[in-house]
Amino acid sequence: MEDDRQRAIEWAQEALHDPNTVILAINAVGSLAPTAEPLTRATPYEVAITSATGRKRWHRLINPQWEAKYLQQINLHGATPPALEAAPTFGEVRDSLLSRIAGKRVVTYGRNMQYAALYTALEYSWLGDNLPEGSMFPDTATTLKELARSRWQCARLRHAEFQNEWDPLNGHYTLPPLFPAGNALQHCRALSELMQQIAVPTLRYAQLNATAEQAVRDGKSHIPRPLSGVRLSRISASRQAVLQRSGGACENPDCPDPRYTSARSRNGTYLLEVDHIEDHAKHGEDLPRSMIALCPNCHALKTRGTVTEEFRETLRATALANHHRLMADAQQR
Ligand SMILES: [Zn+2]
């Protein structure tokens, strides 16, 4: 699993440095044909392409040729039905779009939907945008040939490997959520930022830390669970941040075997335990700087050992020093 994570980091570094990388984001709505069920076939109404660093290369609204009454029911993320009706059809921008992705490494977040929307739009466009009801798509070979001119890469899968959280129920990495709704250009830029965070793990740490601080400000750190007594939840961003900071090794500076954890749990995750240095119940804050990743031995020592206070002081200083080191590094980038 650590190899997968390392490969995801290398992938992001390589994609960011490759001048052939473009980021593609598509917003799509359902069927083209007003008579068909909406949402049976996704078709693009907005396409954005940026460089790997998020610089805008191309951004177009596209008339999905939907009836206005359907368009009005949809959140178009800033676009309006009249703007879409005034926009060119996919057929009119097709060649322009294809020329911008041909020969490129095309990075998307959640490839399937965007690829499918593009695929459908191409099929329609070869046939002149107005298919008779019930017609087949006979031009699959041309469509596939066009799409195969690009190297398609899904950053969401790399993100899942980077997060490295195994979902034992489904037998794969836990898929991170999609980006919050927004226009296509915002999605490209969010993806560019994410790639930079994956490529430079200290940036990721800083970002997770900011998420955790926000959650604490919003009062989300303590969630009473009446059914199982009061359980104090941990902000998952804090936990992820601390694991990130640990680099997979026990953070106790006196740990006799920090990489003991290279023996993994049954589902392949680290045996590291992320713990509050002060008891969370005694006001230990839910933030990375106050938490530490410990191997099972050191964790037992902390909770059941005889040198508790002295040990706690060491951990406190170590967590804080590691925290500041990563934050300072992130700030320099
Ligand atoms: Zn240890």
Image: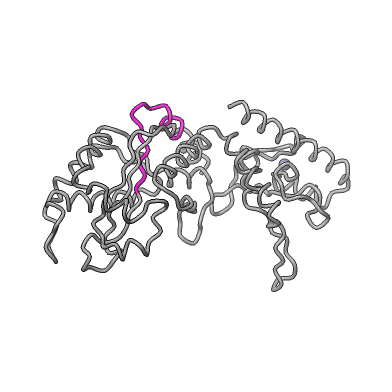
Q: What color scheme is it?
A: one colour
Is 204 on the left-hand or right-hand side of 27? right
Q: How many marks?
A: 0
> Above or below — where is 232 with respect to 206?
below
Is 142 on the left-hand or right-hand side of 19? left
- Magenta stretch: residue 24 in it? yes
Is 207 on the left-hand or right-hand side of 170? right
- Residue drawn at x 62%, y 49% is 237
Residue 164 image offset from top left, x and y in percent: 53, 46
Q: In the depicted view, which residue is nearer to us: 119 or 74?
A: 74
Residue 325 image offset from top left, x and y in percent: 69, 30
User: Which quarter holds ligand 1?
Assistant: top right
> Above or below — where is 28 with respect to 92?
below
Q: Specify the quadrant of the image occupied by residue 290.
A: top right
Residue 162 image offset from top left, x and y in percent: 51, 42
Q: In the depicted view, which residue is nearer to us: 183 or 320?
A: 183
- Residue drawn at x 69%, y 73% is 227
Q: Quadrant of the C terminus?
A: top right
- Magenta stretch: residue 117 in it? no
Q: In the depicted view, which residue is nearer to us: 51 or 148?
A: 51
> Above or below — where is 244 with respect to 333?
below
- Residue drawn at x 25%, y 32% is 103
- Residue drawn at x 27%, y 54% is 43
Is 15 on the left-hand or right-hand side of 117? right
Specify start and end residues of the magenta stretch as a single range. Answer: 11-26
Residue 316 image offset from top left, x and y in percent: 80, 40
Q: In the depicted view, which residue is nearer to us: 222 or 40?
A: 40
